[in-house]
Amino acid sequence: MPISSPLSGQHVTIFGGSGYIGNYVAQALLERGARIRLASRAPYKAQGLKPLANLGQLQFMPCDITREDHVAAALDGASHVVNLVGAFGGDLAKLMGEAPGAIARLAAASGVVSLVHVSAIGADAASSTAYPRGKALGEERVLGAFPKATILRPSIVFGKDDNFINLFAGMIEMLPVLPVFGPQAKLQLVYADDVAEAVAVALEHPEQHGGHTYELGGPEQLTMMEIHQRIAAAQGRDRRFIAVPDGLSATFAALPLTPMSRDQWTLLKAGNTVAEGARGLAELGIEAKPLGLFLDKWMLRYRKHGRFGAANERAKIRSAAR
């Protein structure tokens, strides 16, 4: 059912909207009746959104955000703007720092009403790693050009189709013994729908949220070891987890062709939680949803015999209770 919203009929440009978070953000805005221009290097990746949109409600535009002529074209006629672009490779200062600044500057010049810039918890200009420095530069450039922009800093975003929970779920399904990197690192995972709702609320009410920074995290802090254990329990699998010492983890991350870069290891070790006293989902009127609300259902496909295995377990429990 459509949601009554000030965004109904408004033109929203989403930069980087074909990515994982962009899919959720686009759905939240389509439900509010917004007209969306999805601008990204690979807009074809978001073709699955088409059935959710009414005629003329969704437009796809190839866009390189490092080119101001592309950005200006994507902003043409837009009243609201969202920037979701993020990366772990390439020139991060340019992609996540300078380019967002150009988006904000051109948006201000074209009379855009509200701008939401999605950064990340841990953005830090003084960091030793490129990712948090790039994110911090982006925040600085955006607010310098568009002071009433809203900055959202999500923790690691989880969802049914994410590359975080599902990565570990696949490993746990296959391997009886697994190493855990940064076993005591604390994460405050945030649900993808909650992040999308935060974007929509901030866009709807720039008079209330503009110029503020919000850190988006779920209702609980979990260590990497606890996350692995919960996934295994939801799959109904007995697994052995080995805590990998930090020195060995750092050496592994420094090797070529490994699934985790040195920067990613540094970020993982530092943890990813909402800072004490920071504005968060509650200040946006959103009740954060915990991982446990979804995990059992999502892990059905990873269980032995899948859904049928779950049914057999329930039948055994009922039989034992008689």
Image (cartoon, grey):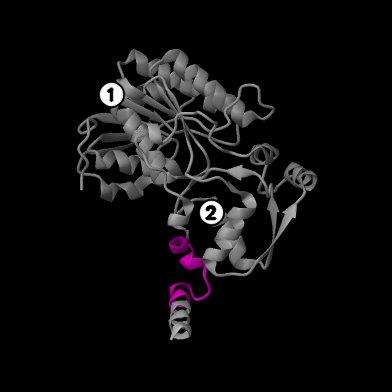
Looking at the picture, does residue 142 appear above or below residue 250? above
Residue 177 x %, y %: 70, 65
Q: Whole-percent x and y of residue 57?
A: 23, 39
Identify the residue position indicated by label 2 in the image.
165
- Residue at x-position 32% and y-position 29%: 203
- Magenta residues span 296-311
Pick whichever, 198 or 91, lies toward us.
198
Q: Position of residue 245 (x, y in %)?
A: 77, 49
Relative to 208, residue 235 above or below = below
Q: Quadrant of residue 209?
A: top left
Name the magenta segment's main secondary structure.
Answer: helix
Closer-to-camera residue (81/184): 184
Could you say which is closer to the camera, residue 63 or residue 317?
Answer: 317
Q: Amino acid at mark 2?
A: Ile
Sort mark 1 into few (<14), some (14-19) or many (20+) by Cα contacts within 10 Å.
some
- Which residue is pictured at 25% across the width and 35% down the height? 34
Tag of residue 301: none
- The circle on residue 79 is 1
Q: State left or right for residue 48 relative to residue 234.
A: left
Q: Are marks 2 and 1 in contact (CB under 8 Å)?
A: no
Give the Cα separation between the discs numbered 2 and 1.
35 Å
Which of disc 1 and disc 2 is earlier in sequence? 1
88 or 193: nearer the eye? 193
Q: Determine whether the residue tagged by mark 2 lies in a helix, strand or loop.
A: helix
Q: Quick one: quadrant of the C terminus?
A: bottom left
Q: Amino acid at mark 1?
A: Ser
Label 1 SS? loop
Q: Does the rendering let one see residue 43? A: no
Magenta-colored stretch includes residue 194: no
